[in-house]
Amino acid sequence: MHPYLNHDACPPDPQLRAVTARLGQAALCYLAGDLDADATGWARTAIQRAQRLPCPLLGLDLRDVTFIDCAGLNLLLEARLEARRTHRAIVLIAPSLPVQHLLRITATRQLFPAAASARAALAIHRPPTPGETAAARVTAARARPGTRERTRGLT
C-alpha cells in the first residue's frame, strides 16, 4: 500500500503501481514494482502528473521498486532534466536496493539527492529563510528531536 493519502493513482499495471500526491510544498510520485521498459509508460504518466503540481520540490518515492533497468534509469534522468528546466528540486525518497545498485554501477547516484522520507526531503529542500545557508538547513533538519537520520546518501 502506498504511503500517501489524497492521491491520484494511474490505471493499474500488473508490474508497476504509480501514485501521485501533494504533501505541503512537495509533489510526490510513489512507484512500486518493476520499473522497466514495459512499465515506464505508466511511470512517466505519474511523474508528469506530479510535475504539473505547482510545487518547488519533486519527490520520487522508490522504496518499493523491486527491479529497475536502463529504461527506468532513463525515466529518472528525464524527470531530473524536467525538474531542472522548471527550476525545481528533485529528490529520491527511500530508494530501494535495486535503485541504489543501478545508480551506483552507472555512476549516476551523485545526480540524485536522496532522503529517508518525504518529510525529510521537505525539511532539507524548503525555501531558505533570509540569511540561512543550505548547510544550516541540513544541520537543523538532522537535529530535530525524535529523528535519528532524516536524510541519507545512496550507499
Image (cartoon, rainbow, N blue to C red):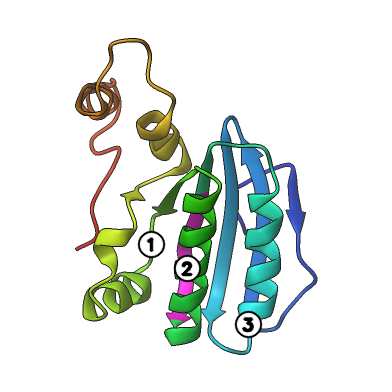
Could you tell me what secondary structure mostly forms the magenta stretch?
Answer: strand
Q: Earlier in the sequence, mark 1 or mark 2?
A: 2
Q: Earlier in the sequence, mark 2 or mark 3?
A: 3
Residue at 50%, 84% (x, y): give it. Answer: 71
| Residue 69 seen in the figure | no
Figure check: 138 above or below 85: above
Question: Which region shows up in magenta?
Answer: 59-67
Image marks 2 and 3: residues in contact by CB distance under 8 Å: no
Is the C terminus in the top left, top right, bottom left or bottom right quadrant?
Answer: bottom left
Three-letter amino acid code at disc 3? Ala
In the rendered image, residue 59, in percent from the top left (x then y), is placed at 50, 49
User: Marks 2 and 3, Cα distance to the nearest angstrom?
Assistant: 13 Å
Name the residue beneath numbered marker 1: 95
In the rendered image, residue 124, in percent from the top left (x then y), is placed at 35, 33
Name the residue beneath numbered marker 3: 39
Three-letter amino acid code at disc 1? Pro
User: Marks 1 and 2, Cα distance to the nearest angstrom?
Assistant: 12 Å
The furthest residue to the top: 130
Q: Quadrant of residue 24?
A: top right
Q: Nearer the viewer, residue 91 or 3?
A: 91
Q: Earlier in the sequence, mark 3 or mark 1?
A: 3
Residue at 31%, 78% (x, y): give it. Answer: 102
The furthest residue to the right: 11
Q: Indicate the secondary structure of the residue bearing disc 1.
A: loop
Mark number displayed over residue 76: 2
Is the N terminus in the top left, top right, bottom left or bottom right quadrant?
Answer: bottom right
